[in-house]
Amino acid sequence: MDEGYIMLVAITACLAGTYKIWQVSLDTREAANRIARDTCSRAVVQLLDGTVAFAGFRLTRDAAGKRRLLRTYTFDYTSDGFERAQGFIVLAGGRLEAVGLAGSPS
């Protein structure tokens, strides 16, 4: 095989991998947005800004010792229309690990 072909295959594989990571990130963010809306609705508070913000990620191990990537998102909400409070969502893939709201907006 010639070097040009190998380089093309390598670049194509790299681009495909980058696209897959980007798509998974978008899907996870959309899941976090749904969870934030549902959480605020159940708590009878208003989700502010209409979206979550990516706060970070970390690698961890589950009970079986398998590595997992946990993504954390934050969102702002209000219960009175004036004071903002912040909630959080932790996802492992698209699966909810934790969600929380502050005790009261400050």
Image: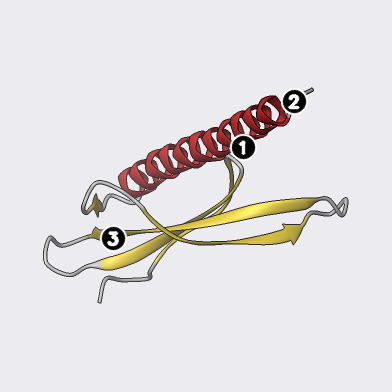
Q: Disc 3 designates what residue?
A: 76
Task: Return the residue found at the far bottom.
Answer: 106
**CA gap, disc 2 and disc 1:** 19 Å
Q: Is mark 3 on a helix, strand or loop?
A: strand
Does the CB distance between marks 3 and 2 fall below 8 Å?
no
Q: Nearer the viewer, residue 51 or 4?
A: 4
Q: Nearer the viewer, residue 94 or 10?
A: 10
Look at the image and name its color scheme: secondary structure
Task: Return the residue found at the far left.
Answer: 82
Q: Nearer the viewer, mark 2 or mark 1?
A: 2
Q: Disc 1 designates what residue?
A: 14
Return the x and y of residue 106 as percentages of the image width and height: 25, 77
**Few, some or many C-alpha atoms within 10 Å of disc 2 (few <14, some 14-19, many ≥20)?**
few
Residue 66 relative to residue 79: left or right: right
**Quadrant containing the N terminus in the rendered view:** top right
Residue 26 relative to residue 59: left or right: left
Kind of residue sitting beneath label 1: Cys
Q: Disc 2 designates what residue?
A: 2
Kind of residue sitting beneath label 3: Asp
> Of callouts 2 and 1, which one flags the residue occurring earlier in the amino acid sequence?
2
Q: Which of marks 3 and 2 is in front?
A: 2
> Of callouts 3 and 1, which one flags the residue occurring earlier in the amino acid sequence?
1
Q: Which of marks 3 and 1 is in front?
A: 1
**CA gap, disc 3 and disc 2:** 55 Å
**Rendered position, 87 above or below 49:** below
**Few, some or many C-alpha atoms within 10 Å of disc 1 (few <14, some 14-19, many ≥20)?**
few
Write down the quadrant of residue 32 in the picture. top left
Write down the quadrant of residue 37 in the picture. top left
Q: Which residue is drawn at 69% across and 60% down?
A: 59
